[in-house]
Amino acid sequence: MSLSEILRFDTATARLRAIAFIEGLSYLALLGIAMPLKYLADQPLAVTVTGSVHGVLFVWLGILVLRGMTSRGKSFAWGARIGVASLLPFGTFFLDRQLGEDDAASR
């Protein structure tokens, strides 16, 4: 699977998949790069910037999940699964296959 297949914004399910992927990357950057910079190299700006970007992406993902539940009739369990995955490092990457299948089915 190529990155261009994941980072598409042409349908609602493609947008959800792309934002979940980018949000997952931002979470890993926050935990793996920015936090060590803050605590080991005394660079708190790294967490400020990365945390802000991650926060915006997290909220955007939440909005897309809620929109999927209301306008596309997805279940609460579907939304909860994405919500829990977004709280775990690498969690959204494990959902990528399912989100890709949802996108293919919606076309």
Image (cartoon, rainbow, N blue to C red):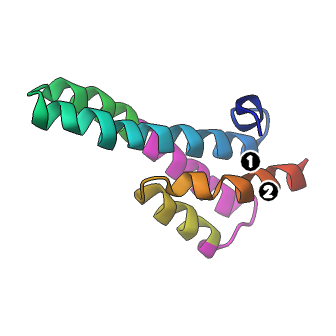
The residue tagged with tag 2: helix, strand or loop?
A: helix
Q: Nearer the viewer, residue 62 or 86?
A: 86
Where is mark 1, residue-wise? 13
Mark 2 and mark 1: Cα distance apart in space: 7 Å
Residue 60 lies, in percent from the top left, at 51, 42
Marks 2 and 1 close (CB-CB < 8 Å): yes
Q: Nearer the viewer, residue 41 or 57?
A: 41
Residue 84 lies, in percent from the top left, at 47, 65
Q: Main secondary structure of the magenta part?
A: helix
Residue 76 sits in quarter: bottom right
Q: Residues within 10 Å of mark 1 (few under 14, many from 20)?
A: many
For the N terminus, give its image quadrant.
top right
Q: Give the number of the disc on residue 89.
A: none
Q: Residues within 10 Å of mark 2 (few under 14, many from 20)?
A: some
Name which residue type carries label 2.
Answer: Asp
Name which residue type carries label 1.
Answer: Thr
Where is mark 2, residue-wise? 102
Start and end of the magenta stretch? 56-77
Is residue 61 highlighted in magenta?
Answer: yes
The residue tagged with tag 1: helix, strand or loop?
A: helix
In the rendered view, would you say 24 is above or below 52? below
Q: Is residue 37 left or right of residue 11?
A: left
Q: Give me the residue at 75% from left, 34% from top.
A: 2
Name the residue furthest front: 40
In the rendered view, would you say 19 is above or below 100? above
